[in-house]
């Protein structure tokens, strides 16, 4: 059983991250992210079962963004030698999502349906030791 995932998308999460342990909590998290103001529509996610680096930092980072208007989202994954972005079928060019008030750009063709964001995060919750396979990935260009 997974120890859970840590999510950070609100200012207070810098001091006290939210920990999710169930699929229902993942759905509530995505719903909360969808209801946040535009400058808070992206989150960082860390698997608690992975070992920390000697520095005490996580050795990986999953970032997800959601757009309530288009009902699409984006994801990037940095893990081991992977530096990946979600691969979607819609290309609106470079898209911008906001992580705690800071702009974060995602490469063209990286937006996927919100339902896929939910599945991706649930898979990461169940096994954060490997790249989630529920979505298509592409090498991140920036």
Image (tube, helix red, strand yellow):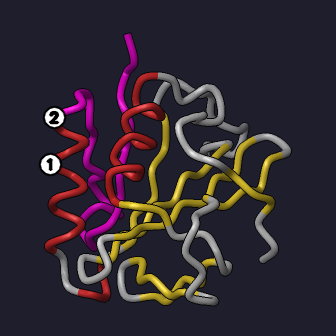
Q: Are marks 1 and 2 in contact (CB under 8 Å)?
A: yes
Label 2: few (<14), some (14–19) or many (≥20) C-alpha neighbours in 10 Å: few
> Measuring 62% from the left and 27% from the top, which residue is drawn there?
51
* Residue 28, disc: 1
Which quadrant does the C terminus fall into? bottom right
Residue 10: x percent and y percent?
26, 70
Instruction: Residue at the far front: name it.
Output: 89
Q: Is residue 19 above or below residue 40?
A: above
> Measuring 58% from the left and 35% from the top, which residue is drawn there?
132
* Residue 57, disc: none
Residue 43: x percent and y percent?
39, 64
Which quadrant does the N terminus fall into? top left
Residue 2 sits inside the magenta stretch: yes
Measured Cα–Cα span from mark 1 to mark 2: 6 Å
Q: Is residue 138 above or below residue 125?
A: below
* 117, 88: nearer the viewer: 88
Instruction: Residue at the far top: name it.
Output: 1
Q: Is residue 23 above or below residue 136?
A: above
Label 1: few (<14), some (14–19) or many (≥20) C-alpha neighbours in 10 Å: some
Mark 2 lies on a secondary structure that is helix
Residue 120: x percent and y percent?
45, 42
* In-image side of 100 versus 46 (left or right): left
* Residue 24, disc: 2
Instruction: Residue at the far right: name it.
Output: 81
* In-image side of 51 versus 64 (left or right): right
Q: Is residue 75 above or below residue 137?
A: below
Query: Which span of residues is magenta-colored?
Result: 1-24
Residue 44: x percent and y percent?
45, 59
Residue 10 sits inside the magenta stretch: yes
> Measuring 21% from the left and 52% from the top, which residue is drawn there?
29
The image quarter containing residue 87 is bottom right
> Measuring 38% from the left and 70% from the top, which residue is drawn there?
72
């Amino acid at each position: 059983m997974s120890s859970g995932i840590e999510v950070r998308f609100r200012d207070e999460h810098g001091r006290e991250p939210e920990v999710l342990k169930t699929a229902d909590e993942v759905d509530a998290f995505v719903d909360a992210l969808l209801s946040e103001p535009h400058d808070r529509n992206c989150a960082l996610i860390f698997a608690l079962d992975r070992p920390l680096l000697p520095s005490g930092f996580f050795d990986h980072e999953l970032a997800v963004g959601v757009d309530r208007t288009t009902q699409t989202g984006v994801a990037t994954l940095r893990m081991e030698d992977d530096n990946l972005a979600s691969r979607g079928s819609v290309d609106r060019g470079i898209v911008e999502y906001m992580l705690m008030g800071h702009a974060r750009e995602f490469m063209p063709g990286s937006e996927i349906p919100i339902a896929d964001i939910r599945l991706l995060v649930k898979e990461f919750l169940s096994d954060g030791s490997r790249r989630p396979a529920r979505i298509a990935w592409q090498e991140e260009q920036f």
